[in-house]
Image (cartoon, rainbow, N blue to C red):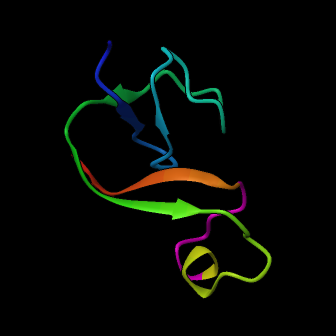
Amino acid sequence: MAREQACRKCHMLTHDKVCPNDRSNELTTEWSGLIIVLDVQHSNVAQTLNITVPGRYALKVS
């Protein structure tokens, strides 16, 4: 199985070659930390990190 990659723009994690959130192909395997956002409307963490789409996100992307 391919290693999960993080989008350099929005930090969303994916196994694809293109970010499902912003369609960017600027992906990297150099990331750390993980946050899973289920409800962007009621999540203070999502609001603080400017996350508008539910999903898995890296906290730090190199």
Question: Viewed as shown, does residue 36 lie left or right of 2?
Answer: right
* Quadrant of the image occupied by residue 60: bottom left
Magenta residues: mostly which secondary structure?
A: loop
Q: Position of residue 41 (x, y in %)?
A: 80, 76
Measured as percent of width and height from the top left, residue 62 is found at 21, 45
Above or below 21: residue 46 = below
For residue 18, side relative to residue 7 (left or right): right
In the displayed structure, 46 sits above or below 52; it is below
Residue in the image at 73% along x and 69% along y: 39
Residue for point 68% across, 55% down: 54
Can you give x and y, in whole percent of width and height, for residue 57 in the image?
46, 53
In front of the other: 22 or 37: 37
Tell me what residue is drawn at x 28 percent, y 23 percent: 3
- Residue 54 lies within the magenta run: no
Front position in the image: 13 or 38: 38
Write down the region rendered in magenta.
48-53
Of the pair 30 and 42, the residue shown nearer to us: 42
Q: Residue furthest right?
A: 41
Q: Quadrant of residue 44?
A: bottom right
Horizontally, is 11 left or right of 44 in the view? left
- Could you tell me which residue is drawn at 32 percent across and 12 percent down? 1
Q: Position of residue 6 (x, y in %)?
A: 38, 38
- Is 18 situated above or below 6? above
In the picture provided, is 1 more to the left or to the right than 55? left
